[in-house]
Amino acid sequence: MDVYGLVGNPVGHSLSPPMHESAYDELEIDARYVTFEPEEIGPAIEGAQALGIDGLNVTIPFKENALSHVEPDSLAERIGAVNTIDFSDSSAPTGHNTDAEGARRAFEHHDVSRDGKSAAVVGAGGAARAIAFMLADDGATVRIANRTVARAESLADDVPSASAHGLDALEELVPKADLLVNATSVGMEDDVSPVPTAALHGDLAVMDAVYRPLETRLLREAADCGATTIDGAWMLLFQGVAAFEIWTGFPAPVERMDAALRRRL
């Protein structure tokens, strides 16, 4: 039996186990997906390798620290975070960042192109980093707006063709943007939006990384304007799909994984 899992702290709320195990069932793979809550990521990775675990997802608060305990691929190294570890190379575990690929496939699933587009990204944390690099790599001009401008500037320095702004700039950035991504937790706890309603328009494609609730105020108001909307479950789904394909080498059963995920949202 193959064993995969998620390492983070806490992980009791995670939707990854049912999503991945639905894929194993669909493809009749003899595997299980388990969760771990260690105090430190280094010993956890060493222990997983010693126990013969085949792959790990990594979540808060370990994504950045995991980088120094694996051989990261070029994208994970540029982003500065690892969320997927593959142990198939016996010499050293390989680190990947499938958050970027998850966001890319979420846009592709909704037929939203990035090349030559203007993108406004709200936030400058881990999710924003992955999304901003993906957008830039796909040919978009990226404008990062964050409450703390210094954090936006730090991210913009790393991302090609990116610029940094405060949240007050969204009133000017969003009307000129083709793509809008909320990469903060705003809208998760309260029915609020990080973006001024008046700035939204029908030519936008709006993705919200928040997946609880699925329909945030931002997405609701964007839909009212006629914009294309992409809820946060799509990015969550496709980062898991990318991890599954790295580990197993099989095309993921996307519809089955999506159904398992959304049943629990």
Image (cartoon, helix red, strand yellow):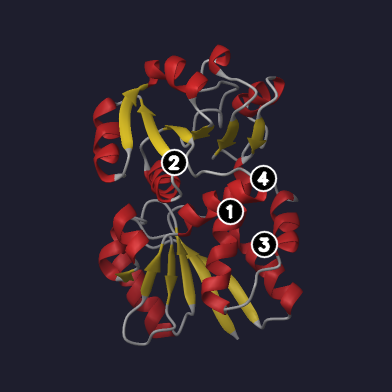
Q: Position of residue 45 (x, y in %)?
A: 36, 72
Residue 110 numbered mark, or none: 4
* Label 4 packing within 10 angstroms: few (<14), some (14-19), many (20+): few
Q: Amino acid at mark 3?
A: Pro
Q: Which residue is mark 3?
A: 18
Marks 2/1 in contact by CB < 8 Å: the verdict is no
Residue 164, quarter of picture? top left
Alpha-carbon span between mark 3 and mark 4: 24 Å
> Which quadrant is the C terminus positioned in?
top right
Observer-side mark, 2 or 1, equals 2
Q: Is residue 261 visible?
A: yes
Label 1 element class: helix
Q: Earlier in the sequence, mark 3 or mark 4?
A: 3
Q: Nearer the viewer, mark 3 or mark 4?
A: 4
Sequence order check: which comes first, mark 2 or mark 1?
Answer: 1
Vertical placement of 130 versus 141: above or below? below
Q: Amino acid at mark 1?
A: Arg
Residue 146 versus residue 179: which sits nearer the camera? 179
- The total of numbered circles placed on residues is 4
